[in-house]
Image: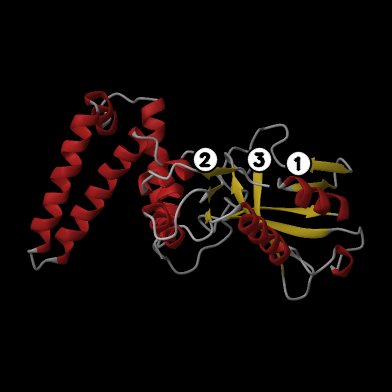
Amino acid sequence: MAEYVVLSDHNAVFDDVKHLLYEGAGYVVFDFEGCEEGSTFHDLYKYSKERFPEKVFGSKEELDEFLKANKSSAASEISFSEFKLNSDGLIPCIAQDAKTGEVLMMAYMNEESYNKTLETGLMTYWSRSRQKLWTKGEESGHFQKMISLIIDCDKDTILAKVDQTGPACHTGNPTCFFTPLTEGAKTTNSDIYKVLEDVYKVIADRKVNPREGSYTNYLFNEGIDKILKKVGEECTEIVIAAKNPDPKEIKYEIADFLYHAMVLMVEKNVSWDEIADELARRE
């Protein structure tokens, strides 16, 4: 079971609940012993439960029931014996980045590798060339954490949504699908999450591997006060641009702000995943 923290300080405030969750607690269980109904601690519980409905619970029993129900609903009703396998007893599995939607690679699974994937949470395949199981990343360190497994309508192909560490391809490319055969109509990159994540990774790399003449490194070298000053200036520029009837100006200023905000995120070690999680909690 995921780790949980019991909150028994009846003088706690909402920031205390947030800090517990942000610092790694899987769940927060409120301890009402000695606390009267209608107290500020009860009000804190109600507000915290509203903000974090799947993270905050009023008792250990309530948490256990939630975890049991969640585990049951997540369990697959389709057994491996129902999959349509090829002549070698294998089923192709396509790995897709769960965050960006990018197709990373294709490999094969047999029942043993499928069960090991479910057991460990790490994508494990069957190597046809070596005739043995292999967990993606066992040699390179570029593991694939399983987010979900989905079977197609014919039950002959698995789609694995994964959290990929490092590049997926043994060549060092982010994906195995990098060799173009032909091109059709040109399209723009409209996957905003991938764009933001890619820019964030470049900024983070600049901090670790500085480049001479880099504006990003200039900001890091100047420190947090300079970064905050630029973020504030860009906010003002957005306000000014919004008064301008030309939409191009505000698009430019918002993009500029997002860049400087990402510099701040890297400086404070905040990821887009954490921002996405916080926004999702507010839905």
Number of numbered discs overlaid on the protein picture: 3
Decide which of tag 2 and tag 3 comes sooner along the chain: 2
Q: Quadrant of the C terminus?
A: bottom left
The residue under label 3 is 143
Q: Nearer the viewer, mark 2 or mark 3?
A: 2
> First in sequence: mark 3 or mark 1?
1
**Closest to the observer, 81 or 187:** 81
- As helix, strand or loop, the secondary structure at mark 1 comes to strand
| Nearer to the camera, 54 or 200 | 54
Q: Secondary structure at mark 2?
A: loop
* Kind of residue at badge 1: Thr
Mark 1 crowdedness (10 Å alpha carbons): few <14, some 14-19, many ≥20: some
Cα separation between marks 1 and 2: 27 Å
Left-right relation of 52 to 88: left
Q: Is residue 79 left or right of residue 4?
A: right
Separation (CA) of disc 3 from disc 1: 8 Å
Q: Are marks 3 and 1 in contact (CB under 8 Å)?
A: yes
* Quadrant of the rendered image containing residue 268: top left
Vertical comparison of 141 with 180: above or below? above
Instruction: Name the residue tied to disc 2.
Output: 24
Q: Which mark is residue 135?
A: 1
